Image (cartoon, rainbow, N blue to C red):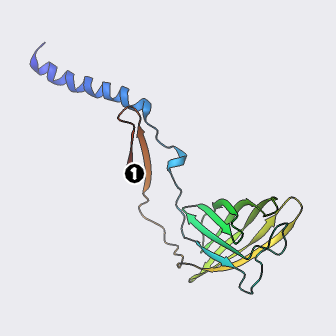
């Protein structure tokens, strides 16, 4: 073959070999690597503004505070007894969002907490229900937070981590718009 033909064929063959070798080890869209975006951050230490327990009635020790950490739409909360609750936050609309948390009491009963988080200025309010197998109660508390903005982003960036298993076993983050 002529040199010009080889100059065209070699790059095509090289790209084909790379694509066949790399793509089977590539994970795109793995839900573990993408965190949905929320329109506000309700992170804070929630307590009953009147003092006392946040939960009117439960099977374990009194819940007097709930330290909430938000990452995107994911919520983690630790109560004053050191019990971890995990859950999600719904879409933030007009500085308000629904939430769900799951955890347990100090007595070992499973708990599901559902309700609303709302922000006004630098204060957030948690208001909802506390459901155990043998108890149904309410939960209420407030916290200082960073003010919630309801601006709609014009460009949303999502980070996707692609694993190149066939290429030195490393991960490569890529920003997509």
Tell me where residue 24 sits by quadrant. top left
Residue at the location (85% across, 72% down)?
Answer: 57
Quadrant of image for the N terminus: top left
User: Exactly how many numbered labels are in the figure?
Assistant: 1
Q: Which residue lies furthest to the right in this view?
A: 134
The residue lying furthest to the left in this view is 3
Asked which quadrant contains residue 63, the reply is bottom right
Residue where numbered disc 1 is placed: 176
Residue under the image location 35 percent in, 35 percent down = 168
Placement of 25 over or under 108, stated as above or below: above
Determine the secondary structure under disc 1: strand
Q: Quadrant of residue 109?
A: bottom right
**As drawn, 80 above or below 4:** below
Query: Which residue is at the front of the view, 55 or 150?
Result: 55
The percent coordinates of residue 75 (x first, y second) are 62, 62
Q: In which quarter of the image is the C terminus?
A: bottom left
Q: Which residue is painted at 39% across and 37% down in the image? A: 169
Residue 7 position, x and y percent, is 15, 24
User: Vertical placement of 64 versus 2: above or below?
Assistant: below
Question: Looking at the picture, how far across and down is residue 70, in whole percent?
Answer: 57, 65
Q: Which of 111 and 24 is in front in this view?
A: 111
- For the residue pair 86 and 37, the one nearer the viewer reads as 86
Tell me if mark 1 has few (under 14), some (14-19) or many (20+) residues whose alpha carbon lies within 10 angstroms of its own. few
Left or right of 113? Residue 173 is left
> Residue drawn at (53%, 73%), measured in percent from left and top?
150
Q: Position of residue 76 (x, y in %)?
A: 62, 63
């Amino acid at each position: 073959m002529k040199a010009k033909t080889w100059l065209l064929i070699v790059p095509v063959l090289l790209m084909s070999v790379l694509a066949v070798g790399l793509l089977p080890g590539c994970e795109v869209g793995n839900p573990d690597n993408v965190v949905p975006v929320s329109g506000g951050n309700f992170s804070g230490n929630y307590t009953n503004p009147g003092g006392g327990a946040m939960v009117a009635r439960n099977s374990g020790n009194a819940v007097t505070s709930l330290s909430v950490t938000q990452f995107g739409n994911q919520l983690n909360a630790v109560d004053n007894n050191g019990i971890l609750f995990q859950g999600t936050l719904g879409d933030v609309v007009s500085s308000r969002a629904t939430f769900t948390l799951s955890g347990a009491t100090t007595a070992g009963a499973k708990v599901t907490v559902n309700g609303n988080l709302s922000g006004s200025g630098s204060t957030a309010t948690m208001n909802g229900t506390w459901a155990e197998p043998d108890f149904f109660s309410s939960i209420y508390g407030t916290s200082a937070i960073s003010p919630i903005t309801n601006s709609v982003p014009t460009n949303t960036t999502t980070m996707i981590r692609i694993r190149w298993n066939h290429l030195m076993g490393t991960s490569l983050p890529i920003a997509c718009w």
